[in-house]
Amino acid sequence: MPQIIPFYASLLVLLFIFLSVRVVRVRRSLQVSIGDAGDKRLLRAMRVQANFAEYVPIALLLLLALELQVFYPWALHLLGAILLVGRLLHAYGVSQAREQLGFRISGMACTFAVMLLAAAILIYRFAMRALLT
């Protein structure tokens, strides 16, 4: 039964809620209900939230698949932590008025690394089982 990835999913949900509330607050302060009204601060807040929503569910699905295959707990913790740190770095980097490109790149690199590694492990495990049967 999965125990590790739901923990990281919960932490990531808290981060997503924080990012979403931030969008709502900026929208309220600018009185903008749809779109970004050309405001760069709102656009940045929206993109941080949207980027999170685009990548995190797929990453968590891959990590959950690994956990369901009874993958090494230490590796699941490592991958979950890297994903969380990556999303924090990305959110910080993109949220700044003068974008911190290093944080943005590091955040995406962490996210991509987790996804690529998890996908590669799952493909490898599938291939090994297929060859053995």
Image (cartoon, rainbow, N blue to C red):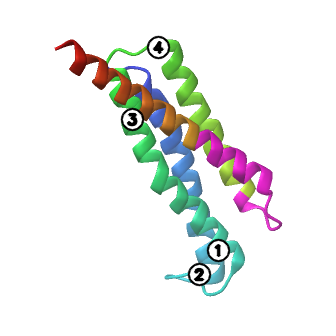
Q: Is residue 20 visible?
A: no
Crowding near pointer 2: few (<14 within 10 Å), some, many (20+)? some
Q: Nearer the viewer, residue 86 or 122?
A: 122
Label whose residue precedes the other's in the sequence (3 or 2) = 2
Q: How far apart, in angstroms, are the residues tagged by discs 1 and 4? A: 39 Å
Query: Residue 63, located in which quarter of the rendered image?
Result: top left
Q: Position of residue 133 (x, y in %)?
A: 16, 14
Q: Nearer the viewer, mark 3 or mark 4?
A: 3
At horizontal 66% and vertical 68% (from top left) the residue drawn is 44
Label whose residue precedes the other's in the sequence (3 or 1) = 1
Q: Nearer the viewer, residue 127 or 108?
A: 127
Is 55 located above or below residue 40 in the figure? above
Query: Residue 21, located in which quarter of the rendered image?
Result: bottom right
Q: Which residue is mark 3?
A: 62
Q: Amino acid at mark 1?
A: Leu
Q: Which secondary structure lies at badge 3? A: helix
Is 28 located above or below residue 3 in the figure? below
Q: Amino acid at mark 3?
A: Leu
Q: Which residue is mark 1?
A: 42
Magenta stretch in the rendered image: 94-111
